[in-house]
Amino acid sequence: MLYFIGLGLSYETDITVRGLNAIKQCSRVYLEHYTSILMTASLEELEEFYGKKVTLADRELVESGAEELLRDADKEDVAFLVVGDVFGATTHTDLVLRAKQRNIPVEVIHNASVMNAVGSCGLQLYNFGQTISMVFFTDSWRPDSWYDKIWENRKIGLHTLVLLDIKVKEQSIENMARGRLIYEPPRYMSIAQCCEQLLEIEETRGTEAYTPDTPCVAISRLGSASQTFKAGTIKELAEYDSGEPLHSLVILGRQTHELEIEYLLEFCDDREKFKQDVASDQEYFKPPAWVPPPEDED
Amino acid sequence: MLYFIGLGLSYETDITVRGLNAIKQCSRVYLEHYTSILMTASLEELEEFYGKKVTLADRELVESGAEELLRDADKEDVAFLVVGDVFGATTHTDLVLRAKQRNIPVEVIHNASVMNAVGSCGLQLYNFGQTISMVFFTDSWRPDSWYDKIWENRKIGLHTLVLLDIKVKEQSIENMARGRLIYEPPRYMSIAQCCEQLLEIEETRGTEAYTPDTPCVAISRLGSASQTFKAGTIKELAEYDSGEPLHSLVILGRQTHELEIEYLLEFCDDREKFKQDVASDQEYFKPPAWVPPPEDED
């Protein structure tokens, strides 16, 4: 059996009882290690908690060499642990497919992930649109295809969850070119950097998917004891010191209810200003009157 | 301390280790009982597993009489258990607010919910739009505001998660009128009924948010041992026997990748037909060429 087990967001005890029981009967345990990190537990703490050796699985191991992972999983129990829930990343779906092709039975044990736990900022999950990823801009690479997605979401009044880039076990271009397996220290995007990139692309594109005054919620260390929410405009949050990782951001859509705003007011510096910012943004982006499509003339 | 603890989807062991530890130190434990059900564990099994008495909290208790729930929660530990994750329903956000207003410390322990576990059908969570709820139609009440939301999602190529109605502890109109606390047996909407209601409203509205041939995935008993996925068109799924509850449905958007389709093919009766259905739907609903907005003439 190949178990896919979500670890949740933060603590080693965020694993489910069922997940922990499964790990205890596995002969090999891998921890997926390149799309996210568990915030408050080290590898050693996990190993002690599980009573098992845990092998870190980097992108190479999962995407190219799934051989090691799948080996004998039809005869013995193997666990593949994923921070958050199991199906946050395409590669994990791919791994399930590969296991099925070899007739390896698969069991999925779900857990919380940012995709549902983000509801704890007070915004209703029902009203979120597509999720985007914000990557670190470099001098030569400033991808902005996410801009259209924010625009699409906001056109129909939906919130946008922005997942902030993390770089774990990345090589510098020089080391990669020389084939040296030397890795850069891990990097995690801050709320301020994300907001600066948002402002930059809005200025370049200029089609107003949002403005510097569009209200957002910064979410830091979701699910941990130091979890923090901060509500403010993009411009304000571009100056915000969000502290330790991990972070994500929600750009508000027009579909906000009074109760949601009331909840967010707990997280802002100036309640009256924030209320006004939300109202102005809603007014500015209110949908134009609906025009029926032209009749076909045939 | 007032603990909000997600129970996950199905088994009593789907609770997290941290959640279970918290329950064990609580003097009172309530289980929210009107927005969802835990599929494979009875109240008695939960009580035995926790080693605690569990009080069912119906809508009245939570929405009107939160008094009992919040009583002494500043001095002792009280747990409020929610199937799935904590923030699936607005009322729970409201309860957090009320606790904060009384200076009762709150801790949230997250878990999986349909909102993220739906990823196990193979469709990427990134590409889901707003979520809709499908309620049981009655002779006099056939609400269809969800239709516009599907249309909005599909216009920008996104999938729509449809949550199917459950009726737990509902009164008949007659019993309600006479003030008799007699409750109807629980009812859970089937996939077939949901699809029939989809077809009916498309026929009434006629603006083609989708067609009878639009591809969907039926999700039954998510996270349990008898979890089943079925891929087919709305018309086909209107004839589908989905078995025991709970169910939900995903209406596919245009943004599907090859790997996602490959995954879904495992769940359909006729792979070639389903591939063709997806391609036809994508072609039929492909977006019109983008027209720049008119210049302001000032």
Image (tube, coloured by chain):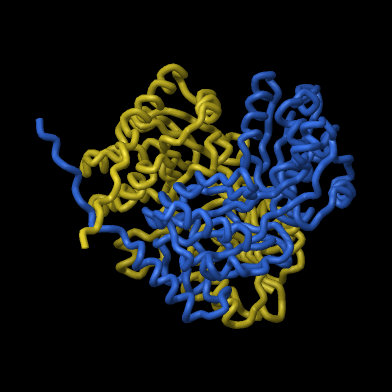
Chain colours: A yellow, B blue
B169 on left or right of B133: right
User: Depth check: A168 or B297 in front?
Assistant: B297
Q: Residue at x 38, y 36 (%)?
A: A192
Q: With respect to residue B63, does A80 lie above or below?
A: below
How many numbered discs, if any?
0
Q: Nearer the viewer, residue B165 or B230?
A: B165
Q: Quadrant of residue A67?
A: bottom right
Quarter the C terminus of chain B occupies = top left
> Residue lying farthest left?
B298
Task: Kindly indicate the quadrant of the structure image that contains residue B243.
Answer: bottom right
Residue found at x 66% / y 68%:
B228
Residue B54 at what x, y percent from top left?
A: 85, 40
Q: Is residue B78 left or right of residue A227?
A: right
Tell me what residue is drawn at x 58 percent, y 60 percent. Answer: B196
Residue at 53% x, 80% y is B270
Quarter placement of the N terminus of chain B: top right
Can you give x and y, in whole percent of width and height, for residue B85 in the image?
Answer: 65, 45
Residue A239 appears in the rendering: no
Q: Nearer the viewer, residue A219 or A192?
A: A219
**Left or right of residue B78: residue A157:** left
Q: Position of residue A190 (x, y in %)?
A: 41, 40
A190, B217: nearer the viewer: B217
Rendering coords of residue B79 (x, y %): 77, 36
* Whether residue A215 is visible: yes
Place residue B293 in its image quadrant: top left
- Left or right of A242 on screen, residue A9: right
